[in-house]
Image (tube, rainbow, N blue to C red):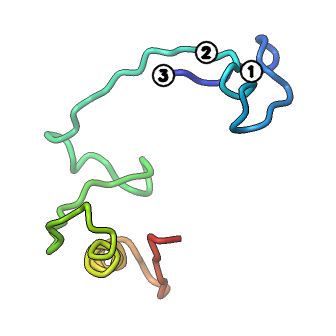
Amino acid sequence: MGYHLEVARGGAAVWCPGTVGDKRRPHDHQAVKITNIRENQSDFELDTHGFEVRPFSTSATDFDDNAAIAEHYYPEVCAHVQKVYVRGAASQTDPAE
């Protein structure tokens, strides 16, 4: 994985996103270990790890149809997130934002 190099180590102090200079910024390449967590899904908690794996099923079948995704999938995801993760105070989650 390539991280932008820090200024103290030769990275750019000023840069403009989306420009050629941004693309040419020096990077610090680091090896990243990828682990399959399927056998250990229950070991991860939102409050501790920043994510959780929960079962979820959807009625959506065509993920190439943006209108169908917005009409069916997004509301199902919102309802699932609110049911599983919203603890206490009422909240509205909008994945389109």
Residue with the mark numbered 1: 6
Of residues 89 and 80, the one nearer the viewer is 80
Horizontally, residue 19 falls left or right of residue 66, namely right
Residue located 29% across and 72% down the image: 69
Q: Position of residue 63 (x, y in %)?
A: 24, 62
Q: Amino acid at mark 2?
A: Asp
Q: Position of residue 89 (x, y in %)?
A: 49, 85
Crowding near the residue tagged with mark 1, few <14, some 14–19, many ≥20 C-alpha atoms within 10 Å = few
Callout 2 touching callout 3 (CB < 8 Å): no
Q: Position of residue 20 (x, y in %)?
A: 71, 26
Q: Position of residue 4 (x, y in %)?
A: 66, 24
Q: Of all residues shown, which one is farthest toward the right?
A: 14
Residue with the mark numbered 3: 1
Residue 31, above or below 71: above
> Residue 77: which quarter of the image?
bottom left
Residue located 17% across and 62% down the image: 55
Of residues 76 and 35, the one nearer the viewer is 76
Horizontally, residue 9 falls left or right of residue 93, namely right
